[in-house]
Amino acid sequence: MTGGRTADVGGVTVSLDHYVNGRRIGSADTFEDRSPLDWSLKLGDVARGDATVARDAVTAAIGAADGWAALGPAGRATILRRLADLIDEHVEPLATVECLDMAMLHESLRARVIGRGARNFRAYADLAEHHEPRRWSSNGTDNEVRRMPAGPTVVITPWNAPFMLSTWKSAPALAAGNTVVLKPAEWSPLSCSYLCDLAEEAGIPPGVLNVVQGLGGEVGAALVADPRVRRISFTGSPETGQLIGVAAARNLVPFTAELGGKGPLLVFEDADLAAAATTAARMYDDAGQVCLAGTRLLVASGVAEEFYERFRAATDAHVLGDSRDPATTISPLIHPQHLARVEGFVERSRVAGDTVVFGGHRWKDDGLWYEPTLIRPRDNDAEIVQSEVFGPVLTLQEFADEDEAAALANSTKYGLTAMVFTRDASRASRLGDALRAGTIWVNTFLVRDLTAPFGGCNASGIGREGGDYALDFYSELKTVQVREDTTYG
Ligand code: NAD
């Protein structure tokens, strides 16, 4: 079905169609996309892809693969850097679209998040272009490890930070020479649609980057089931990660899964309590819809009271409101279903006997905001401690010593991030060993070096992306061994 349907999203024109083989195509079916800022505002009826669209997109990716691979790392890098420049030039419209579609704060989108999308493309263009293959001699042979594009890659992303996460995964796949079919989440698909316009303007050839819209169980499931796909990169919930793992296993396709989190934030007696408390209050940013957040506050008993006072003051400084208003620091949640899910967690916690210290309610009857909430659980097995809420809900527990702190920190099924506040360098180093998480921040939070590995342990994920770890994942590695005394005649 030919496309051509667009929406006016805060004055920005965004296609509601798929983008396959360099063309906009529609679907007979659509799904509604509404704004969390005002649920009565329908942003558009977005094309609802099915198995046919999924098949066509993978076919397009296969058709474009040889040409894209033939450009080599330097040729691809030139185009990807052009795309990065275009993202930087379109920060305002992208921020407008993402703010209306997902409700992330406009100011942080404008100042940081959209620019991170450009950085993703630049960083991987540089890494792929300047990669030095490993070369060495052994057993009478000269050896070299080469990277070969893996092939058509499916990227599936969640609704929180859709632009940043989609570029975080598409950029290394493209830089490594793969062609991509990207499926953004159905609750916030529009910034990825806008990305296609920029990709086309940057000169990405037709079929190299395809975007299909639709529901996970429909077009998403069809994409990951396609045996022609050679890599799957997924970010989302552990439950969907399991389904994708099953589909990948059927076709023997390597996949990475960046999944949920329930990070501990540990505060020791010797910590800079002001910094720890301010950082803890930042866990309410983006209404807590952040996989990396330290949602379990674990505080040394001796400083628990002082920490709490400071944390409470920092939390009171938050401003709930419209994400377009620069004064706002807490946005609404993404969707009424998600608000009900967050409410359900808090209600079950209350009923089970946990103490809701503050918050625990919707902010207003007629919006999707939920108050910043703090809960003291009755014990460590409480659901509110063990399960990811993905909303503005933190727990506070005390510990007696370092061993207990580490044991509590490692006591959930997750292992994405951990934060430690201490002035003791040897303690920081010991916890760097003891904590089971993919990223451990000491006296800081959210600082990201794109060359570092990123991913989670246990239910927080499989595999690592970031830097060369991602480029290796999106490549087939091969070893070429040449006998040292070979003479070619
Ligand atoms: P989700 O698992 O419901 O959906 C994620 C994506 O998977 C969506 O695009 C969805 O359409 C698709 N999908 C759903 N079912 C599918 C299927 N059967 N086959 C193929 N695709 C399918 O997750 P969500 O609610 O969108 O996102 C929230 C989750 O993502 C949270 O658990 C959060 O912690 C996690 N997350 C993790 C990271 C990380 O880097 N580790 C980053 C952001 C979000």
Image (spheres, grey):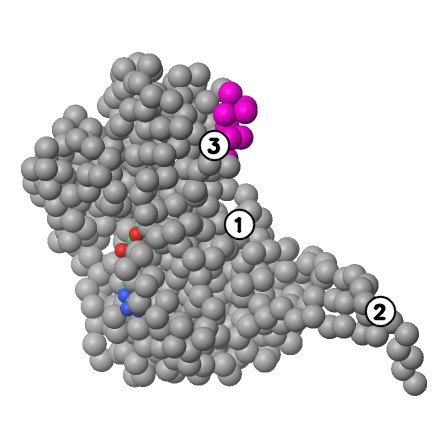
Q: Secondary structure at mark 3?
A: helix
The answer to which of marks 1 and 2 sits earlier in the sequence is 2
Q: Count numbered badges in the picture.
A: 3
Q: Magenta stretch?
A: 424-432
| On-image quarter of the N terminus | bottom left
Query: In which image quadrant can residue 24 be found?
Result: bottom left
| On-image quarter of the C terminus | bottom right
Q: Report the residue marked by disc 1.
A: 453
Check the image and report above or below for 445 versus 71.
above
- The image position of residue 93, as x and y in percent, is 38, 52
Check the image and report above or below for 147 versus 67.
above
The answer to which of marks 2 and 3 sits earlier in the sequence is 2
The answer to which of marks 3 and 1 sits earlier in the sequence is 3
Q: Nearer the viewer, residue 295 or 250?
A: 250
Q: Is residue 140 left or right of residue 387?
A: right
Q: In terms of secondary structure, what is the magenta stretch mainly? A: helix
Check the image and report above or below for 456 versus 32.
above
For residue 123: magenta? no
The dot on residue 431 is 3
Q: Residue at x 34, y 61 (%)?
A: 241
Residues at badges 2 and 3 in contact (C-beta under 8 Å)?
no
